[in-house]
Amino acid sequence: MNKRVSTLLSALLLATTLGWQQPLVNVAAATHAQTTQKAKTAKSGKHAKAKKSSKAKKSSKAKTSKAKTVKQPASASKHIKLAGASNARDLGGYINKNGQKIKAHRLIRSNTLSKLTKADTKKLVKTYHVKTDVDLRTLVEQKTSPDVKIKGVKLVKANVFKNFGAFPDFSKKNAGVKMMEKSYHDAVTTAQGRKAYKMLFHELLKNPKNKSVLWHCSAGKDRAGMGTVLVLSALNFDKKTIANDYLKSNKYLVQTNKENLAHQEAGWTKGGKTLTPIVVSNFKAQNGVQMAYLNTFYKAIDKNYGSMNGFLHKGLGLSNTQLKQLQANYLTPAKK
């Protein structure tokens, strides 16, 4: 009996919320309807949350996908075998973030051209269509060890540094790394460095569509390496591809670095100094390339120009039209 009264009171209470005009016979139906509606609302809410979560996951995947490195074909960036230059490379074949390839025999990076043989010069002109040689070394280097003159090839003197200045004390730990990091910083923060790389891009913009531009320094790893980073960035390449290309200098300069190290060690001991592991480590830091140097380069650009794009525009004075011109000249058409 008490249970029936309780049920009736509950029904009356529900009837009050629904309106006194409704007959009690409809209360149960109303209760069922409200319960069903709540269930639908809850289900709908769960569905909406699931949909939102799904969208968020898709968005996250899309962002991750954009950040992925472009897998480069084995045929990309061929090493050019020259008797007088061990670190010469054709950048042709690299694929950028838009799926565009650098055209073969158009963009070439190298080390010094002062020891080229006649066969070397013939190969560069006949096979690789070199039209312009941009020398990024100091004026002293250019004078004491000039590039071999190549008939029909324009020589452009674009020294990144006015001079190297005094060497640090290599008996101190990490002196070699700090010296290299400073040079990478100065290459983009000094007017001289920016002027040199502006000259490189000026030649790239003027270059005919059937010819190539070659840029080099002494070892072809630092000043030429930084120049290559800028060129690949302007052509819309991902940082991983750029870093991999940069680090290849360690592979092609193995023998050269051995010879340099032996010469440096002999010079050090000849001066009556003790050759310690720290000194040797500093010599090795000077001879090779490291990600620490490249990261210093990027940090200097980000700090002073906000981004690589900012440096290309403000630091080197390149317009969007010029960047598109570079891409049209040196890359295959984008896939539609």
Image: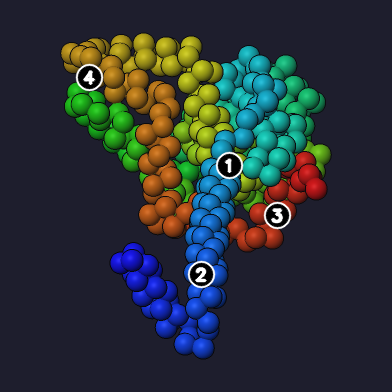
Q: Earlier in the sequence, mark 2 or mark 3?
A: 2
Q: Is residue 166 left or right of residue 38?
A: left
Q: Earlier in the sequence, mark 1 or mark 3?
A: 1
Determine whether the residue tagged by mark 2 lies in a helix, strand or loop: helix
Q: CA distance from mark 2 to mark 4?
A: 89 Å
Which residue in the protein does label 3 denote?
324
Task: Identify the residue shown where x is 81% and y is 39%.
Answer: 210
Identity, as a three-letter code, of the amino acid under mark 1: Ser
Q: Earlier in the sequence, mark 4 or mark 1?
A: 1
- Image quarter of residue 135: top right
- Which tag is nearer the camera, tag 2 or tag 1? 2
Which residue in the protein does label 2 denote?
28
Q: Earlier in the sequence, mark 2 or mark 4?
A: 2
Determine whether the residue tagged by mark 4 lies in a helix, strand or loop: helix
Local crowd size for mark 3, using a 10 Å CA cut-off: few (<14), some (14–19), many (≥20): few
Q: Mark 2 touching mark 1, by CB under 8 A?
A: no
Depicted 278 relative to depicted 63: above or below: above
Residue 301, percent across and down? 43, 51
